Image (cartoon, rainbow, N blue to C red):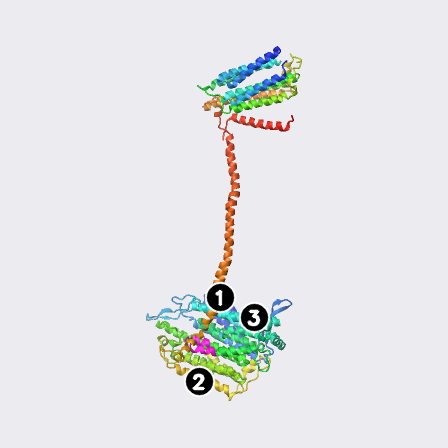
């Protein structure tokens, strides 16, 4: 009998860890990894709520499927960008990509 | 054309000449003088027509040629001006027309028309001569044409307009207009050579002195208008009006005078100024700075005569209130001043060396005669003397101008540096300048009252006879003495100038002047002889009844009642003969052997008195001390420096300084720091904020995200804690 | 404590440790490997939630494709001595604070929510769920539009990635 709360707390922690990674890590690829963590936590939230609150319906699942697809596409494009930037500037440190500054 | 229309048109040709010359023909000398002389001729012609019509009209005095027109609307009625030709103005018109025409013609020659332009002549200075070479290559200097030739003719044209206006007008207002125009022209013409400092001083002196008289005259006119409501002669001389004026006391009961007396005295003071009587005589000798035609016209024939004309015209007013020959206050004043001036000026004339100064003082003296005559009630005699004096005095002045020209010719020829107007530098000119000599002699004899053949005798004799006949002894003796002195100084003048031998080389080389100058002299000489015969008194022995006493009948007809003729008495005639012939003889005797460089015998005889006379009793110095210097002080020290520069400018500068300081304070303490500061603050502030805020855009994505989250959390916490109830 | 709960706790702890290691590991390859472990843990959670399909999808898509992509990218962008020095940027404290605050906030909201501690309801028709999901994704009155859009997105992403990361022709 796992209450819903456990899942939600877990998802919250995972989300916050991912957020920490996004905000703090230097390496751009590591930032993307943090984003992945956040997306996964969202998925867990969605599935948990589907299971506990509206298990007859299908909306939660459909949402989660779409999230999967989006996450995949986003990672692909993001990594392609990072590789392109790496080719140009020879660095993947996020702070070095600051040409849009004042 | 009716006679009234002709009279209206009489003043216009000279005025037109003035405008044409000033506006258009200033550069063309011949055209200018032609216009001027043409205008004078036109007016002369018109005057002759009017005069002949006038003398053939019966009872011109009671129904004169008159015409009025409405000029200014004054409430319900109109101020009317008009023309009036009664016997007095007709006679005046006669001599004015002749003398003006003669003087205009004379001016052509006087200003050396036809001569080349001078070597270094400048407008504003007398011409100094031009060097010409004759066929042998000898150069000598001859007189040069006046640079401001046309200007002269313009001014005398304007002057003639003023005089004609004065003579034909029927009311005191237009008379005063003419009076003032002549005053202006006198100013302009005395100072014709305006670069000369003495001329400038003289023009101002003339204008201001006559102004003093004019102010009082204007007061008199204003008083008259306020008392009667009209300035027209026909209104003033109605018996009821005169009666009323004689009976009402003057404003404030001034010295117990009647209104008529007060007005008379005020108007007379105008004459004192204009006709250069003592105490306002000081301008006339100085006015000799002007060219000689000016002296002739203004100071012999016309302007000074205008003063006498005015009092003769106003005689009924001056006489109002007297019964049976008793003199009114105004008349007594006139008598005193006239007689005093006559002898006073005659004494000064004895000691003058300048040929024109003698004539100037002579004019003052003769005007005194006329005024004294009028003062004792000798209306016809005064008018008669006015007419004859105009002719022979104009003749004498023009003659003196001719003499001066002749001597100047000699001065230019010999190069001597002498005053061409000093009689002690002349002598023997009768041989060199015969026409001038004979005409001058005729004029001089007329002035002295040479018996029978000269006009001056008849008019002067009449004045003396009137004085004697009415028992005014003091006046009689004074005038007789003045006549003696007149004859003496006139002969002195003639002897020194024409008789004897030339005392300087310039006099030796003098030359007769051109026909334009000698012709007027001859014509005026004819009048100087002949005009006297129109006024021979009926009761004169032998020739008494041959010619009617035209003057008495005609001019006397101007008054309401024909004045009575004085019965003949031998005494005034005898005295007159004695003083005239005696004075002439004495003058000839004293001066006939005057040598070059010798002292004036009179100086030796009179000693210190002579110095007093020569310096004109120091009146100019006295006036300078009493009036002129204080006036200058007031103007300069007080009004200019203290009042104008000190107080008014001081206040203005003070206010300006305050305003400037306030402005400065506002600028420095408010405008710059606050207003500018605010503007700058806003601008700079935004720039600084921008510069500060732009640092947010670091280009680092993670920092953006952090900022977004921080702010989002902040907002969220705010909303949670304000809106969510626990 | 039931067996379910025990399994949950063990897996949760492992997953969280792995997740933390992802974000704190110095070596990027190590982070990727820790990421794989995290994803695996999440898959197990799907199983616990009676969403087996999703567990399989998770493993295949995330671990099989995405994580491998990460490793590729890490290797392609590796430089010598790249993993030396601190791996966090200068604002790590703020990031940590934010994350903590966010967690506290979420927890706060969740605790005050009523349905927090509700138990799992009964699950009906277990075997028909996949068919139901499949039908929902393609039926016009349900979720065909997001499905198609997701397809377009994937195609676009693929083309974009190829274009961006492709070698530029010299």
Same chain letter for marks 1 and 3: yes
The range drawn in magenta is: B343-361
Residue to which mark 1 is pinned = B22
From the viewer's perspective, tell me whether residue B129 is left or right of residue B66. Answer: left
Rounded to the nearest angstrom, the CA distance separating label 1 from label 3 is 34 Å
Q: Nearer the viewer, mark 3 or mark 2?
A: 3
From the viewer's perspective, tell me whether residue C3 is left or right of residue B213. Answer: right
Residue sitting at the far top: C3
Rounded to the nearest angstrom, the CA distance separating label 3 from label 2 is 45 Å
Same chain letter for marks 2 and 1: yes
Between residues C166 and C67, which one lies in front from this camera angle? C67
Is residue C54 something one can see in this rendering? Answer: yes
Same chain letter for marks 3 and 2: yes
User: What secondary structure is found at the residue carrying circle 3?
Assistant: helix
Chain hosting mark 3: B
User: What secondary structure is found at the residue carrying circle 2?
Assistant: helix
User: What secondary structure is found at the residue carrying circle 1?
Assistant: helix
Q: Which circle marks residue B582 in the picture?
A: 2
The answer to whether the residue labelled 2 contacts the one labelled 1, judged by CB atoms less than 8 Å apart, is no
Q: Callout 1: 10 Å neighbours few (<14), some, many (20+)? A: some
Q: Quadrant of residue B470?
A: bottom right
Compared with residue B568, is residue B342 higher up or lower down, i.e. above or below?
above
Q: Nearer the viewer, mark 2 or mark 1?
A: 2
Rendered residue at 52%/45% (across/down): B670
């Amino acid at each position: 009998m796992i209450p819903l709360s456990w899942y939600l707390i877990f998802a919250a922690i995972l989300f916050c860890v991912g957020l920490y990674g996004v905000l703090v890590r230097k390496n751009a690829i590591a930032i993307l990894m943090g984003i992945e963590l956040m997306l996964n936590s969202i998925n867990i939230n969605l599935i948990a709520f589907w299971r506990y609150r509206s298990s007859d319906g299908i909306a939660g699942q459909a949402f989660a499927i779409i999230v999967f697809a989006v996450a995949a596409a986003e990672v692909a494009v993001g990594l392609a960008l990072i590789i392109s930037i790496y080719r140009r500037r020879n660095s993947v440190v996020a702070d070095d990509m600051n040409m849009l500054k004042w | 054309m009716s006679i009234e229309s002709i009279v209206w048109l009489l003043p216009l040709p000279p005025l037109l000449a003035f405008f044409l010359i000033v506006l258009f023909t200033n550069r063309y000398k011949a055209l200018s003088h032609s216009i001027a002389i043409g205008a004078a001729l036109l007016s002369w012609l018109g005057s002759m027509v009017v005069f002949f019509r006038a003398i053939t009209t019966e009872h011109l005095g009671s129904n004169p040629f008159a015409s009025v027109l409405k000029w200014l609307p004054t409430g319900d009625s109109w101020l009317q001006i008009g023309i009036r030709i009664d016997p007095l103005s007709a006679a005046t018109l006669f001599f004015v027309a002749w003398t003006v025409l003669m003087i205009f013609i004379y001016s052509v020659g006087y200003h050396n028309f036809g001569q080349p332009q001078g070597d270094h002549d400048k407008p504003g200075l007398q011409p100094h001569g031009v060097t010409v070479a004759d066929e042998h290559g000898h150069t000598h200097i001859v007189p040069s044409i006046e640079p401001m030739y046309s200007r002269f003719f313009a001014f005398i044209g304007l002057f003639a307009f003023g005089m004609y206006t004065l003579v034909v007008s029927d009311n005191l207002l237009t008379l005063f207009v003419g009076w003032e125009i002549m005053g202006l022209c006198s100013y302009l013409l005395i100072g014709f050579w305006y670069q000369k400092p003495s001329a400038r001083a003289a023009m101002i002196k003339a204008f201001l002195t006559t102004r003093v008289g004019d102010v009082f005259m204007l007061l008199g006119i204003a008083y008259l208008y306020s008392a009667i409501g009209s300035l027209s002669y026909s209104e003033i001389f109605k018996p009821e009006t005169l009666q009323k004026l004689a009976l009402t006391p003057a404003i404030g009961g001034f010295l117990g005078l009647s209104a008529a007396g007060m007005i008379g005295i005020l108007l007379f003071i105008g004459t004192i100024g204009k006709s250069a009587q003592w105490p306002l005589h000081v301008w006339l000798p100085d006015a000799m700075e002007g060219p000689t035609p000016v002296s002739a016209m203004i100071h012999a024939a016309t302007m000074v005569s205008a003063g006498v004309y005015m009092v003769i015209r106003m005689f009924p007013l001056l006489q109002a209130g007297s019964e049976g020959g008793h003199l009114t206050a105004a008349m007594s004043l006139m008598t005193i001043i006239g007689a005093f001036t006559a002898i006073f000026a005659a004494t000064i004339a004895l000691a003058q060396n300048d040929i024109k100064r003698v004539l100037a003082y002579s004019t003052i003296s003769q005007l005194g005669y006329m005024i004294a005559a009028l003062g004792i009630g000798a209306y016809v005699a005064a008018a008669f003397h006015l007419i004859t004096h105009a002719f022979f005095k104009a003749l004498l002045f023009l003659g003196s101008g001719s003499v001066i020209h002749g001597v100047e010719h000699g001065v230019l020829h010999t190069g001597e540096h002498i005053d061409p107007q000093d009689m002690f530098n002349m002598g023997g000119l009768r041989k060199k300048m015969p026409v001038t000599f004979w005409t001058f002699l005729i004029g001089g004899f007329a002035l002295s009252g040479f018996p029978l053949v000269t006009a001056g005798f008849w008019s002067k004799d009449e004045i003396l006879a009137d004085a004697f006949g009415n028992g005014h002894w003091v006046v009689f003796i004074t005038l007789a003495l003045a006549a003696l002195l007149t004859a003496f100084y006139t002969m002195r003048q003639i002897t020194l100038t024409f008789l004897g031998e030339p005392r300087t080389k310039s006099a030796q080389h003098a030359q007769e002047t051109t026909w334009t100058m000698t012709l007027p002299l001859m014509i005026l000489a004819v009048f100087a002889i002949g005009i006297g015969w129109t006024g021979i008194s009926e009761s004169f022995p032998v020739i008494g009844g041959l010619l009617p006493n035209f003057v008495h009948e005609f001019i006397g007809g101007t008054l309401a009642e024909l004045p009575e003729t004085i019965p003949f008495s031998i005494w005034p005639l005898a005295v007159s003969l004695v003083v005239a012939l005696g004075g002439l003889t004495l003058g000839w005797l004293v001066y006939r052997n005057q040598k070059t460089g010798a002292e004036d015998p009179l100086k030796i005889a009179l000693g210190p008195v002579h110095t007093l006379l020569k310096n004109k009793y120091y009146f100019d110095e006295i006036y300078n001390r009493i009036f002129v210097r204080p006036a200058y002080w007031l103007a300069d020290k007080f009004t200019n420096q203290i009042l104008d520069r000190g107080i008014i400018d001081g206040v203005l500068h003070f206010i300006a300084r305050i305003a400037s300081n306030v402005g400065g304070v506002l600028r420095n303490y408010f405008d710059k720091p606050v207003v500018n500061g605010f503007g700058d603050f806003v601008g700079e502030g935004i720039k600084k904020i921008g510069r500060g805020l732009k640092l947010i855009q670091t280009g680092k994505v993670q920092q953006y995200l952090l900022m977004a989250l921080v702010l989002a959390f902040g907002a969220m916490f705010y909303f949670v804690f304000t809106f969510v109830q626990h | 404590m039931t067996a379910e709960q025990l399994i949950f706790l063990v897996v949760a702890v492992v997953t969280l440790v792995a997740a933390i290691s992802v974000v704190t590991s110095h070596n990027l390859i190590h982070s990727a490997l820790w990421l794989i472990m995290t994803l695996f843990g999440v898959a197990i959670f799907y199983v616990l939630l009676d969403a087996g399909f999703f567990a399989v999808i998770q493993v295949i898509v995330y671990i099989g494709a995405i994580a491998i992509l990460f490793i590729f990218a890490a290797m392609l962008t590796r430089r010598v001595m790249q993993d030396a020095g601190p791996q966090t940027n200068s604002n790590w404290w703020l990031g940590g604070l934010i994350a903590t605050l966010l967690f506290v906030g979420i927890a706060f909201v969740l605790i005050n929510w009523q349905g927090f501690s509700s138990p799992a309801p009964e699950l009906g028709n277990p075997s028909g769920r996949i068919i139901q999901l499949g039908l929902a994704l393609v039926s016009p009155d349900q979720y065909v539009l997001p499905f198609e859009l997701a397809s377009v997105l994937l195609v676009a992403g693929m083309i974009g990635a190829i274009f961006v990361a492709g070698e530029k022709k010299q």
